[in-house]
């Protein structure tokens, strides 16, 4: 039986700290995914519709308030209960917390592989515990992850360094980075890709560009090494307002395809 992967759009950026616009991302990523300029083949030889099914639940109606978290948890839980693996399109990174809550409720403590320029470990940011700069603090303090590995970090301030030590977060900074330094992680594995983890020369359409980042090829190399069963994933923080000729949307669509193929390849290892 072919694995079922389900797209869930979460068009919310109410917890963004600087620029709004990532709420516009889900339809832009879908447009790039299904565009005739490309095709549905993945690098491991799989094809959408041939080797796995990609079903789209559309965009969840959100109201830009705290009650949205319950709606997100419910949608992700329904997806998992249907037998699917949720692949979430943000929106800002604050959405990862309620998504992980739902995946944890179904599968227990997770191992998380997190690509980002920023560790997103603030206790509070601008007084907001639900900030997109804080989801991994909420995740770790609640015991939702038994292990958190962060890749691409290049803006680690003192507070976030202390938070990482407090929670035992494994950070692989960009200085002297190579993909083979990233451990092969056990399942159940959750993968979170903040697009500003990628260098802005390749993914300019983000609200917080940070030079000196990952290449798309490095991200794919890290993903390719992972063998653990994957219970869910997200792609977040694409901001179409700052994109150039849809370049970042195309990157996001590429990563979506490759994540889906990885979920399929690793499904037998659950």
Image (spheres, rainbow, N blue to C red):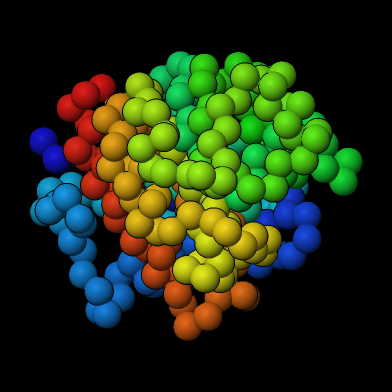
Residue shown at 40%/50% (left/top)?
A: 219
Image vertical order of residue 111 relative to residue 151, above or below: above
Residue shown at 38%/42% (left/top)?
A: 179
Residue, far bottom: 245
Image vertical order of residue 37 relative to residue 84, above or below: below
Residue shown at 24%/47% (left/top)?
A: 261
Residue 268 at x, y percent in the picture:
18, 27
Q: Quadrant of residue 170?
A: top right
Residue 100 at x, y percent in the picture:
53, 31
Q: Quadrant of residue 129?
A: top right
Residue 143 at x, y percent in the picture:
60, 16
What number of labels is visible?
0
Residue nearest the viewer, comparing 262 with 76: 262
In the image, 159: left or right of 76? right
Residue, far front: 176
Residue shown at 65%/40% (left/top)?
A: 119
Res 264 seen here: yes
- Quarter of the picture containing the N terminus is top left
């Amino acid at each position: 039986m072919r694995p079922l992967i389900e797209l869930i759009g979460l068009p919310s950026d109410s917890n963004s700290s600087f620029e709004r616009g990532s709420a516009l991302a889900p339809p832009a990523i879908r447009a790039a995914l299904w565009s005739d300029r490309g095709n549905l083949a993945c690098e491991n030889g799989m094809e959408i519709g041939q080797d796995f099914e990609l079903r789209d639940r559309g965009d969840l109606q959100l109201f830009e308030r705290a009650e949205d978290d319950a709606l997100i948890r419910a949608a992700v839980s329904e997806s998992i209960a249907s037998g699917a693996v949720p692949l979430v399109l943000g929106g800002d990174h604050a959405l990862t917390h309620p998504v992980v809550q739902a995946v944890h409720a179904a599968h227990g403590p997770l191992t998380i592989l997190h690509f980002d320029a920023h560790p997103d470990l603030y206790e509070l940011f601008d007084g907001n515990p639900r900030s997109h700069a804080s989801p991994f603090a909420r995740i770790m303090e609640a015991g939702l992850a038994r292990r958190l590995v962060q890749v691409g970090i290049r803006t680690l301030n003192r507070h976030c360094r202390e938070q990482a030590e407090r929670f035992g977060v494994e950070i692989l900074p960009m200085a002297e980075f190579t993909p083979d330094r990233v451990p092969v992680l056990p399942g159940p594995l959750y993968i979170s890709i903040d697009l500003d983890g990628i260098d802005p020369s390749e993914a300019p359409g983000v609200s917080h560009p940070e030079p000196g980042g990952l290449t798309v090829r490095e991200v794919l190399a890290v993903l390719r090494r992972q063998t653990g069963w994957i219970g869910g994933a997200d792609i977040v923080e694409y901001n179409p307002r700052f994109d150039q000729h849809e370049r970042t949307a195309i990157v996001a669509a590429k990563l979506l395809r490759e994540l889906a193929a990885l979920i399929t390849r690793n499904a037998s290892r659950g």
